[in-house]
Amino acid sequence: MSIAVVTGAGSGIGRGVALALSAAGWTVALAGRRAEPLEETARQAAGETSVVPTDITDPAAVVALFATVRDRFGRVDLLFNNAGSFAGGGTPVEDLAYETWRQVVDVNLTGSFLCAQAAFRTMKEQSPQGGRIINNGSISAHVPRPHSVAYTATKHAMTGLTKSLSLDGRPYRIACGQIDIGNAATEMTARMQTGILQANGETAVEPVMDAADVARTVVHMAGLPLEANVQFATVMATAMPYIGRG
C-alpha cells in the first residue's frame, strides 16, 4: 500500500490529483483548510482516503498532519505539495499591501517548506527508507504575468526549494520533482477565459486545458521507482502565451 499526502485537496488541481492517485491505487490523505471540500473529495475517491483539515502555514498543524498519517497508515510515500494562494494577483507592485504579500509568502513558500520538511523527516526515518515530494510550481516559476509580484516571487522560490530537496534527499532515497502548470481549467483560472492582462497592456482571452491532464502527469511522476525522477515537467494549454510571453 502506497500512501500519499495531497495539500489543497479540496478543489482544483489538488482535488484532481487526489482523485487520480486514488484511482491508481494510492491511499490518499487529504489536507486543506476546510473540512467540507475535503470530505467532498473523499466521497468522489475510488479508494481509501483520510480527511485531515490542516492550515499549512501553522508549523504545529503540519507536524500534526504527518503524525496523523503515520499513526494511521504507518508511512508516507508521496507528498504532493500543492496548496497555494494567488491573493493580490492583478494588483500593481506599488499598491500591494504588506499583509497580502505575507499571506502569499506564508502559504506558497513557508507552507510548502513546512510540509516538505515534515515529509522529509518522515521519509528519512521510515523503513523502507525514502519517498517522493512533488512540488506544484507554475509557469510563473519561469516567467511572470503583469501585476503578480508576490505569486511570481514565491513560485521562483519553489524551484529553489525543489532543487535543494532533491540534493539533500539523495542519501535517504528521497526524490523531489516539480510540475509547472499553465492554464489548467480550475476556479483560479476562470478569468483566463474572460480576458486577462497581457505583457503588452492588452487584455486577451487565453486557452485552458483539462485539469485531468495535469493529474495524469502527477500520477506518472509519482509512480516512478525512486531510482528515477522527473525533475521538472511543464504541462500547459498548448496555445497559451508562454513561449514568447513578455
Image (cartoon, grey):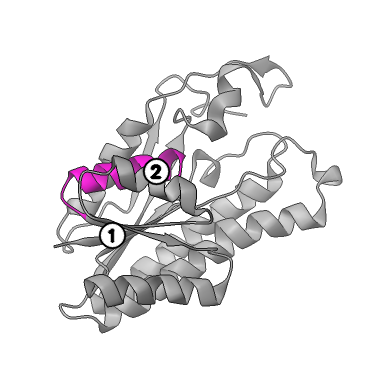
Task: Report whether 72 appears left or right of 105.
Answer: left
Q: Is residue 3 visible?
A: yes
Name the amino acid type tagged 2: Glu
Q: Residue 107, percent across and down? A: 59, 58
Give residue 17's position: percent from left, percent from top: 33, 44
**Residue tagged 2:** 40
Amino acid at pointer 1: Ala
> Who's the residue at 27% across and 44% down the image?
45
Q: Is residue 168 above or below residue 90?
A: below
How crowded pointer 2 is (Cα within 10 Å; few <14, some 14-19, many 20+) is rated as: some
Task: Determine whether 196 is above or below 118 in the image.
Answer: above
**Quadrant of the snapshot with the N terminus:** bottom left
Tell me the magenta residue range: 10-26
Q: Determine which of the numbered discs, if any, sits on residue 4 in the image.
A: 1
Q: Say which of 81 and 42 sits in front.
A: 42
Q: Which of 55/180 is in front?
A: 55
Question: How many labels sit on residues?
Answer: 2
Q: Quadrant of residue 193?
A: top right
To which quarter of the image does residue 69 belong?
A: bottom left
Left or right placement of residue 29 versus residue 126 in this view: right
Task: Indicate the position of residue 16 as horizontal and vertical percent values.
Answer: 35, 39
**Upstream in sequence: badge 1 or badge 2:** 1
Q: Quadrant of the C terminus?
A: top right
Whether residue 115 sits left or right of residue 48 in the image: it is right
Dominant secondary structure, magenta: helix
